[in-house]
Image: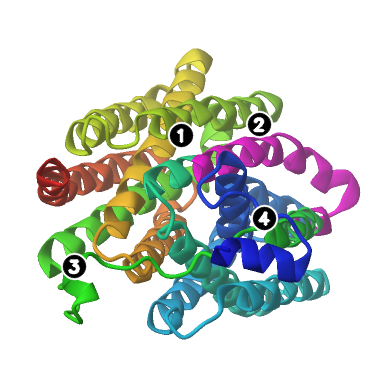
Amino acid sequence: MTAATESQATSGIRKADPNSLVARTFLSFLATAGLFYVNIMPAIVDGLIEGLSFTARQAGNVGSANVYGAAAGALIVVFLIKRLSWRPTAYALLAGLIAMDLLSMLITAPQALIAFRFLHGIIGGALVGVGFSVIARTVNPDRTFGVLLVIQFGLGGLGNLYLPRLVPPFGVNVLFVSLIAFTVVTALMVPFLSDYPTRKEKNAEAAGVAQKIKIVPLSLTLLALFMFQAGNMGLFAFIIGLGKSFSLDLDFITLTLAASGWIGIVGAVIVIALYTRYGRLRPLLAAMTLTIIGIWVLHYSDNRTVFFIANCGMGITWAFVIPYLLGLCAEFDKAGRMAALGGFASKMGLASGPLLAGKLLGESNYALLINLGAIAVLVSLVACIAPAILQDRVAVDE
């Protein structure tokens, strides 16, 4: 009797096969629940501005504080993951998220909400770190990260389509209710996941020799993750305001955001289908180059077609690049610590982008945001080249 079978017999619940599509989907929900607000960040930022009369800087700071908290939570998990039993930890963190979102409904002052959402972020980031560490124990984690992006972009598209329209009649609390609903659904999935014991290293670790982490390529991968997320999220958090500055109407903007999320799923599906069949270097170079082009053409957003195509194109490449970069981190060790560390770098980028953008935006300095976003992705492209080449060679040798 296998460990998975014994676990099922003890709990009375039929577990999903550890590497099945169902399991990858449930794990994706688990790794998304603590950070789902990032996928609906434009709706949250605009909702705080419209619903609570926050300034653009205040709203951006709330979003950034939430993600900085998540980065701190993810970093804590990096050091604790080997000592934690992931399932009880996940239940506790999911309960904490629900409680914090409920309490957030009572807060209307910008500074208080900034502080409170930072604490919420710590809990959520810890949950994402746990989720990433478990994903790293699956076979071909790139594919699971691809499913993760399908979930995030698909449901994020729905949120960005409907939530900005629900804030005026129902108030800003509708944003927190949507986050609670996602958390509850995730909690219902956890019992059906397998135990996912730590993956054993190959002969070196079996003989008691610790795996050596290649610090330089890992650091470059983390830098690539940070810059890519910062460049994209700095624009994404204020994309509704950018569209309005070009005299685009809210209905068209929100429809574009929803479409970019849903069309972006194509990028994640391609990762699921290809994973590392053609290595990581060529796919990353191609997708990041297209991202830079998509960001730059936002300078011409007065043309509705350009705005729509640019957002949809960036949605595809965003959902394509992140699974590869996170999968690259996961390859540096098999216990899931580097995957959790990748989650930390990713969240730092997601937080820093809106924070810097909010400070630089002023009244309507969107041209500067577009240029900085393109430069950030270019830096990410350069940083990922050496680690991708290294891992592609390792894959060939194996």
Label 4 is placed on what type of residue? Lys
Q: Which residue: 44% across, 49% down?
A: 233
Check disc 2: other Cα within 10 Å, few if <14, some if 14-19, many if 20+: many
Q: Which residue: 42% across, 50% down?
A: 234
Residue behind mark 2 = 254
Check disc 4: other Cα within 10 Å, few if <14, some if 14-19, many if 20+: many
Residue 203 figure quarter: bottom left
Horizontal and vertical percent position of residue 144: 47, 46
Mark 4 residue element: loop
**Residue mark closest to the camera, 2 vs 4:** 4
Mark 1 residue element: helix
Calculate the distance from the C-alpha at mark 4 to the C-alpha at mark 1: 25 Å
Mark 2 residue element: helix
Taking the magenta stretch, the answer to whether it contains residue 281 is: no
Residues in magenta, as a range? 147-176
Label 3 is placed on what type of residue? Asn
Residue 203 tag number: 3
Horizontal and vertical percent position of residue 374: 28, 39
Label 1 is placed on what type of residue? Ala
Horizontal and vertical percent position of residue 21: 56, 40
Residue behind mark 4 = 15
Q: Is residue 181 visible?
A: yes
Q: Is residue 227 visible?
A: no
Calculate the distance from the C-alpha at mark 2 to the C-alpha at mark 4: 38 Å
Residue behind mark 1 = 268
